[in-house]
Image (cartoon, rainbow, N blue to C red):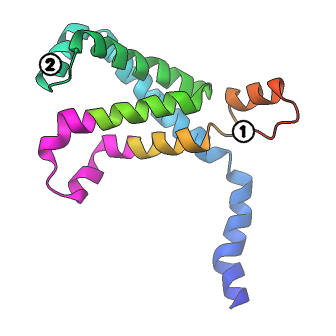
Amino acid sequence: MRALYKLLLGWPERIAQYLLPLGPLLARIVTGWVFLWSGWGKLNNLPQMIENFTSWGIPFPHILTPFVSGVEFFGGIFLLLGLFTRISAGALAVTMIVAIKSAKWDDVDSLETLLGFDESEYFALFTWLAIAGAGKLSLDHLLARWIDPSSQAK
């Protein structure tokens, strides 16, 4: 049994230890890139986006549309840099909840449908980044080590 454990769980875990910084880095790069451009597109098309927010029933669309667009744009930049990752990812996770509730909820007929939305996938990634942090390959990590050299920031 011990040999089976070492074969199926032990050695992949040891190998994965060398690759741990890549998980948050890849998640940040992919989501950061997507949301930087999504936010940029919304910021450059605010009148149409305000109409969309209005039709989705989002309150105060003249205020929330530029706010959410800015969260996406600047949140995307911050994720790419790995700076203020937990704050940015948390804010973007909230925007995904609002997006699902306001623009997609009428299409939900099952858990499979809900979990199949891109917004649900992004929500999961953003929630993970908000909890786990940016990882070692980030400005957050460098900043934490600069502020507190004894820190073992992740």
Q: Inspect the magenta stretch and tell me whether residue 106 lies in it.
A: yes
Q: Is residue 86 left or right of residue 49?
A: right
Q: Is residue 132 above or below residue 37?
A: below
Q: Amino acid at mark 2?
A: Thr
Q: Is residue 85 above or below residue 50?
A: below
Q: Is residue 56 left or right of residue 68?
A: left
Residue 63 image point, x, y percent: 28, 10
Disc nearer the start of the sequence (2/1)? 2
Of 118 and 152, nearer the camera is: 152
Image quadrant assignment for residue 53:
top left
Of all residues, the one furthest to the bottom in this rendering is 1
Residue 53's label in the rendered image is none
Q: 10 Å neighbourhood of mark 2: few (<14), some, or many (≥20)?
A: some
Element assignment for label 1 = loop
Of 93 and 7, nearer the camera is: 93
Q: Which residues are magenta?
A: 99-122
In the picture of the structure, the residue carrying the numbered disc 1 is 136
In the rendered view of the protein, which quadrant contains the N terminus?
Answer: bottom right
Of all residues, the one furthest to the front in this rendering is 59
Q: Is residue 81 above or below residue 110?
A: above
How far apart are the alpha carbons under marks 2 and 1? 41 Å
Q: 10 Å neighbourhood of mark 1: few (<14), some, or many (≥20)?
A: some
Residue 126 image point, x, y percent: 47, 39
Q: Amino acid at mark 1?
A: Lys
Q: Is residue 70 left or right of residue 48?
A: right
User: What residue is rendered at 69% in x and 26% in y?
Assistant: 139
User: What residue is rendered at 52% in x and 21% in y?
Assistant: 77
Q: Is residue 115 above or below residue 80?
A: below
In the rendered view of the protein, which quadrant contains the C terminus?
Answer: top right
In the picture of the structure, the residue carrying the numbered disc 2 is 54
